[in-house]
């Protein structure tokens, strides 16, 4: 059964469409000091090579805001300025030519300051993400709802949506992020009933790499499976390139994007007679460089191995110290265990060139 996505308005972050009938885009955020524009640009270029489609940069002060013009000029992908506390930084970011703004309603200040930003964004046709975060929710809402709740987060988002709409501004996308997955899910579900703006989804403060991958896959995957989400960021305490890789893996697992190679492998058992863990690990490492959509099966025995390998673009089914090599559903030949890795790499290269 295919996933039926929620119908949303379409906006453009630079040339990249978000919402409407566009594919779900993968974002990340630089962790460099934005004031060091060259270092930031180099990281953006790495992210772009990994498949990142939109990048966000922190703008903590005026020096960082002044660096944005060079970053935007050199960036191969659209740049979003992440603004907190000082509305003047948003105005500087717009002047620098950023393709989008992310504002946290809980800390940007008065409605009047928001209106000043909106007026300038409207003049420049620059979208704004209303980024509600459970960790910085307005105190009055926490008091009203007796804590940080999905209802409180949605009310915060809707209040700021109204400010923008009153100024005839509808280049809006919304995020309702929390590190608590059930809270985050409830908030997005509730808001989806009230607006048709595109959603930026993610589990904020997801944690170090291993923990963060699990929480992100569960939270983001649950929303996507329900058809919610138009652009995503996996938030990890790790190299931002990892965020992009995991983002695509989540989308691929749900059949929502085709990008790069997918490696499937068996869990191993007493029937396995080749070092399947080492082979799978090395193939996955090599496959990270692949951009063409390919399915590669690394299977350890004759029970499920031949079936899975036959369904993949390329695969092996292990035997005693050897394996059958499959390509496009056909058995090619037997290969010795010590040759498996080199043969798979060579065959992957051939498939990329086809």
Image (cartoon, helix red, strand yellow):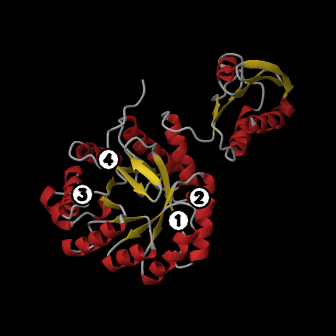
| Secondary structure beneath label 4 | loop
Residue for badge 1: 30
Q: Quadrant of residue 240?
A: bottom right
Local crowd size for mark 1, using a 10 Å CA cut-off: few (<14), some (14–19), many (≥20)? some
Q: Secondary structure at mark 1?
A: loop
Q: Name the secondary structure under disc 2.
A: helix
Q: CA distance from mark 2 to mark 3?
A: 29 Å
Residue 9, which numbered label?
A: 4
Residue 45 drawn above or below residue 6: below
At a point 16% along the width and 66% down the height, the residue shown is 140
Q: Position of residue 63 (x, y in %)?
A: 47, 83
Q: Pick whichever of labels 2 and 1 is earlier in the sequence.
A: 1
> Are there few (<14), some (14-19), or many (20+) residues within 10 Å of tag 4?
some
Q: Earlier in the sequence, mark 4 or mark 2?
A: 4
Disc 1 versus disc 4: nearer the observer:
4
In the image, 182 versus 97, the foreground residue is 97
Q: CA distance from mark 4 to mark 2?
A: 27 Å
Alpha carbon of mark 4 to alpha carbon of mark 3: how far?
Answer: 17 Å
The image shows residue 311 at horizontal and vertical percentages of: 64, 21
Disc 1 to disc 3, how far (Cα)?
25 Å
| Marker disc for residue 157 | 3
Relative placement, left or right, of 214 versus 340 is: left
The residue labelled by disc 2 is 47
Q: Are marks 2 and 1 in contact (CB under 8 Å)?
A: yes
């Amino acid at each position: 059964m295919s996933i039926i996505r929620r119908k949303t308005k379409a906006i453009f972050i630079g040339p990249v469409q978000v919402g409407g009938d566009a594919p779900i885009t993968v974002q990340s955020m630089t962790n460099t000091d934005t004031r060091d524009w060259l270092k930031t640009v180099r990281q953006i270029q790495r992210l772009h090579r990994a498949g990142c489609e939109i990048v966000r940069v922190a703008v903590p002060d005026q020096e960082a805001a002044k660096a944005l013009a060079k970053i935007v000029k050199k960036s191969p992908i659209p740049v979003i300025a992440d603004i907190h506390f000082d509305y003047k930084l948003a105005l500087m970011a717009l002047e620098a030519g950023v393709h989008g703004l992310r504002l946290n309603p809980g800390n940007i200040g008065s409605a009047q300051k928001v209106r000043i930003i909106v007026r300038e964004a409207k003049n420049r046709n620059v979208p704004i993400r209303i980024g509600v975060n459970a960790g910085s929710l307005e105190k009055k809402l926490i008091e009203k709802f007796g804590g940080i709740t999905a209802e409180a987060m949605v009310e915060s988002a809707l209040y700021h949506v109204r400010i923008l709409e009153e100024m005839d501004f509808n280049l809006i996308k919304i995020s309702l992020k929390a590190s608590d997955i059930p809270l985050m899910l409830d908030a997005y579900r509730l808001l989806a009933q009230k607006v048709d703006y595109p959603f930026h989804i993610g589990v904020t403060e997801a944690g170090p790499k291993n923990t963060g991958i699990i929480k992100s896959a569960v939270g983001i995957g649950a929303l996507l499976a329900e058809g919610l989400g138009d652009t995503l960021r996996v938030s990890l305490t790790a190299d931002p390139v990892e965020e992009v890789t995991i983002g695509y893996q989540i989308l691929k697992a749900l059949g929502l994007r085709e990008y790069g190679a997918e490696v499937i492998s068996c869990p191993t058992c007493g029937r396995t007679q080749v070092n399947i863990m080492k082979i799978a690990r090395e193939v996955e490492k090599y496959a990270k460089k692949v951009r063409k959509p390919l399915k590669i099966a690394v299977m350890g025995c004759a029970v499920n191995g031949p079936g899975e390998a036959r369904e993949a673009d390329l695969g092996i089914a292990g035997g005693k110290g050897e394996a059958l090599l499959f390509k496009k559903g056909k058995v090619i030949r037997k290969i010795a265990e010590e040759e498996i890795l080199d043969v798979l790499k060579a065959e992957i290269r051939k498939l990329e060139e086809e």
